[in-house]
Amino acid sequence: MRISPSTKRLIIGILSGLLAVMLLALAVFQWKRQQLLTSALALVKERIERKYPVILTLGPARFVGFKSVEVRGMSLVPRDAPTDTLLQARRLEAGLSVRSLFAGRPVFSDLEIFAARLTARKTATGDNYGFLIKKKAGTAPRDTTKGTNYGLLLNQALETGFDNVPGEVVFRNFYVSYLSPRHTAVLRLPELSIRDGDIAGRLTATIDSVANDLGISGHIEPGDYALTARVFGVGGSVQLPYVPQRFGALVSFDTVLVRLDGKDFEDDDTGGRLTLRGSLAARGFSLYHPKLAANEIEVQRGALDFVATLGRGTLALEKGSRVVVNKIVLNPEIAIWTKPSRAININISSEETSANDFFDSLPTGIFDEVRGTQGTGTLTYHLNANLDMANVDSLRFDSGLRGKNFRLTRFGEEDLNKLNTPFIQTVYNDKGDSVRSFAVGPPNPDFVSYNDVSPYLIHAITTAEDPRFFAHHGFMEKAFVKSAIQDIKERRFARGGSTISMQLVKNVFLTRQKTVARKVQEALMVWLIENTGLASKQRMLEVYLNIIEWGPSKYRWPSGKRGVYGVKDAALFYYGKRPNELNLPESLYLASIIPKPKFARYSFDAYGDLRRSTRYFFRLISDIMVSRGLISQNDRENLPYSLPLNGPARQYMAFAPHPDTTRAVQPSDSTEFEPLNLIDLLNTGAAAPDAGVNSGAPEVAPAKPPK
């Protein structure tokens, strides 16, 4: 069928008209859509400015697709600081439902922010971001006289953070900076995305000059206050900022997994209490602080499942929390108070752990000398401590390791059994330089057996240094507590509080560094020796007497050896005698200088008489020895307070300056000579112990001095 020219013209006219109508409708639609978009953005601006005291400025907006919107520029400025821009972005793109737009309820999605910059500043007079942490209506003014309410503050921070998490957002080239008089932080994020709650991104963080390249992945549910986030180092480990500046420590990790399962906040008379449940887990964790250990403390795998509560002046790790260190599982309950005074209560118990798992799980950097130790049976640990800084003398401390069917089958890096065999002892000066090496045992002609030492000296030393040496299992809790009290008061390692067992382990196996790690390792090694019967008490004391320092390390003997080490050197150096010939006053003097042998010369005045503090020590120790039946009352009453020096020390002591010029080094009271609390640690009415308690086998008691 042929179409006539007139029909063709009619069809073309109709189609042209329809196209024109469609183009007109499209133009109207686009005009209306643009108008609605402008209105929608104005509504967003109004809502933001009504919620926060800010000025939101949005650049030109247009549709770049049927459902895609582009905004050319954005800035957010605090209303009270119009020149201090908090947030700005070069460009924003988002998806926009056209139906929702025409329905008057615009729904944005898939937000992408390009070249954004968030600049937070804090000065002595204020900041440009504090308005984000809004107080709830009706909240009473914060009262800090009874302590900061950590629960309230953290709850506000969590609600601010979670309530402002966008549903769908991608940051590209996002730059975040924080500036304050004390801290500086810069974050550079090439890309960070949140899609359906899934988080992924990479960033470079420089905080207080500590820089890290990080990767982040995880999931967030803002409505449930739930978060799972994995933070890991890119190309290396992650070093925590702020810690070096605040605590002088270095803390790093390879990967950390943070999980927050939820929160509960309860209003109460104190302003509110927050409970958090979640976990922290780390791989490749490392900690270094010179007061903790000489080397880095490392844990390959560690985790904390926590039930934490925070309130006014209180922070607590509640029952139900769990700590995993490699294969060791601990159940901690810890409470800290900051008001009315600082105080802490600790209760930690471990689950029963096989001996091999226990030793394999010990962190490196603390227990290096026992690494590789193996055994049978199981081990459990407990710690109970309570301290109120307003009453430091009330300190309570109870710590212990318990074995069940425990037996050592292999020693670690250090062979603890060497106490029972001849070995080479190397001694060092305070600078860490080697002074002298000598054999401890019969191969050394200067070695003195236990039975060849004057009983006076044995009893004077054990009474002064460790009154219950022959009865305890290596530790004296009261002595440790009193020592810790003085250390806390003076904020330094003021007193050792060590038993003879602990001093022996320190001298034979460990360094002289005053670190927490050395003390902890020392305690573990003492426990292993004392609770497995590795060495008898007499053998331990015999080794102790033959290795301890007893005089000036610079003194050179005619034979060429340096220093005064061991009981034979001491008896010869001070008195020109053999160790079995020492009388009571000579023994008391040697016992008095063990804590500080380098200050031995200051026990005498310029006239060669014993000074008041040394005479006090003589009276104190001899009175206790009388009460324990170690010496007679006649010995005590006839105790002389002059002490002839017939050995090389006579010339050495002659250089002691006059008392008036030695106050800096001469103690003015008895604290110099009271390392173990003496009287209140003793049952002074009891006889001296006559048997060991560790191995179960009878042990020969030290002989009493002749009457």
Image (cartoon, helix red, strand yellow):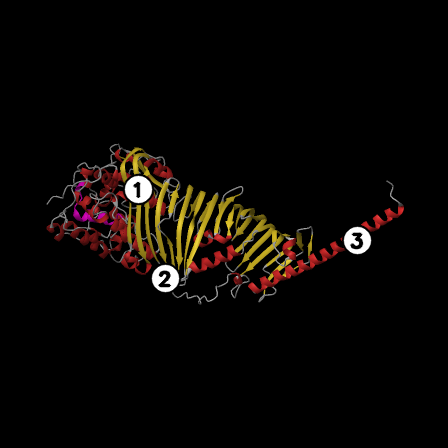
**Quarter of image, res 77:** bottom right
Give how far across and how far down residue 133 sits, in percent: 50, 61
Of residues 21 and 91, the one nearer the viewer is: 21
Numbered disc in front, either 1 or 3: 3
Majority SS type along the magenta span? helix
Q: Callout 2: few (<14), some (14-19), or many (20+) C-alpha neighbours within 10 Å?
A: some
User: From the viewer's perspective, is 551 left or right of 259?
Assistant: left
Query: Are there few (<14), some (14-19), or many (20+) residues within 10 Å of tag 3?
Result: few
Which quadrant of the figure has residue 142? bottom left
Q: Tag 2: residue type?
A: Lys
Task: Say if 170 sits above or below 436 in the image.
Answer: below
Residue 199 lies, in percent from the top left, at: 54, 47
Label 3: which residue? 20
Mark sitting on residue 289:
none
Q: Secondary structure at mark 2?
A: loop
Q: Is residue 84 visible?
A: no
Query: Percent x, y for residue 530?
Result: 25, 40
The disc at residue 380 is: 1
Q: Position of residue 643 (x, y in %)?
A: 19, 50
Q: Amino acid at mark 1?
A: Thr
Q: Look at mark 2 in the image and give the residue it sits on.
A: 339
Q: Look at the image and tell me in which quarter the N terminus lies.
A: top right
User: What amino acid does circle 3 point to?
Assistant: Ala
Residue lying furthest right in this view? 5
Q: CA distance from mark 2 to mark 1?
A: 34 Å
Q: Which residues are magenta?
A: 580-594
Q: Which is more N-terminal, label 1 or label 2?
A: 2
- Density class for disc 1 (Cα within 10 Å; few <14, some 14-19, many ≥20) is many
Q: Nearer the viewer, residue 489 or 649?
A: 489
